[in-house]
Image (spheres, coloured by chain):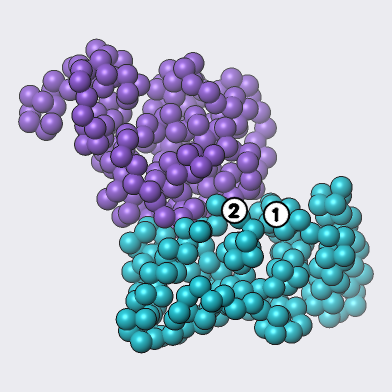
Amino acid sequence: MDNFINKFNYLGAAFGVSTQIKEYVDLEEFFLEATLYFEIDSRTKQAILNWCAKYAILLSPSKIRRLSVQIKYNNDSLDFIVQFLLANNYVKHNWSILIKRKIKIVINFQENFKKYLKSNTFIIKNVPEIRYRAEGRSQVIADILAFTEKKRFKSLYELAKNIHSPRNRVNETFRQLQFFGII
Amino acid sequence: MSDLTILLTELNDWLKDQGLEIELIVIGAYALHLHGISSRMTMDIDTLNRVEHPKVISKIIEIGEKYGLPEWLNSQAQGLILPVDFFDRTICSTMLSNIVLKYASRVDLIKLKIAAYYYRHTYEPKDLDDLKLLEISANELVLGIDFLLQSHAPEQSKFKKDFISNVKVVHSKLKELLLG
């Protein structure tokens, strides 16, 4: 739980002071991990929903689907969050690929980014994982930039594995970024 | 230590440098923390009084910006109906030199949480979470319900009857949820 809260704080929850996380934090992996803590208490639930309402637009549903066969998550909570996001137009229709079971969404959601989340200025300054996505870069480019800003890697295979992205796309994108001197 | 204590300590150090002192009367989740009831899910410090000094207000905003927590210290609880003699029962923390940090007594926290639960339970479950953390006794629940009946009852008698029956429903619900 503490590990999750630290990550959540780092990625924007207003549960206190952010701990600088030296390791790269994968946004889609975090999203799936959040489903495990969704029902823990009402403040966490509201904070997760607020985070999703604000940041889900930056996430890749296809990457979430790919990751969902590799890591532990809560299926019911995932169904709930995705359908909540779709019903409230926080994400586009392509998110429906994540729905396994249609459910009726009944929730008292309080959208209050100021209360539940850290400020934009702070997050954009301190969280490269979100900054590069928010700048409009593709998921693979943003993840490569965020990863390389934080960590060294020995091979493109290792990089692809860490950012949970297909090797061929990572190879191609990395070379392009290198060719133009961006990294 | 709650993360918010880091921000309070920073404010305290600055106040010390400036030779200033402020008083904060705290309720809500941070008061629970000051009672040693630990929850990492404290998002802000709710105070009953407002800081008036412009320099101090600027510093509070500056600290909030530094940590990305713009609402870390707020006086939204101002104007709340308080139990009789509430201020006589507040506890004064000695952890900070230049902030007189007073917080609600356990019994008053319970009374306020029960009142909050009465008004918000249909859409805000955090009050129930806090009441569970407080592990209240049957007697404390009665004290909370009495506070609600005495201090929150509408003046007009035509609404009083409904109010009393609604409070009774909430009482049995809380009994079931908190005392089993």
Q: Residue at x 82, y 73 (%)?
A: B147
Chain shaded purple = A
Q: Dot 1: within a 10 Å radius of its alpha carbon, few (fewer than 14), some, or many (20 or more) residues? A: some
Q: Nearer the viewer, residue A127 or A104?
A: A127
Q: Determine the secondary structure under disc 1.
A: helix
Residue type highlighted by circle 1: Leu
Residue B78, visible in the rendered structure: no
Relative to A149, residue A175 above or below: above
Residue for point 49% across, 29% down: A32
Residue A93 lies left or right of residue B137; in this view the side is left
Question: Looking at the rendering, which quadrant does residue B32 occupy?
Answer: bottom right
Residue B80 left/right relative to B21: right
Q: Is residue B43 left or right of residue B103?
A: left
Residue A111 in view, yes or no: yes
Q: Is residue A43 above or below residue A34?
A: below
Label at residue B39? 2
Place of residue B59 in the rendered image (x, y in percent of width and height, measured from the top left): 35, 74
Residue pointed to by mark 1: B133
Q: Amino acid at mark 2?
A: Ser
Pick whichever of labels 2 and 1 is earlier in the sequence.
2
- Chain painted in cyan in the figure: B
C-alpha distance separating marks 2 and 1: 8 Å
Q: Quadrant of residue B168?
A: bottom right
2 and 1 marks in contact (CB < 8 Å): yes
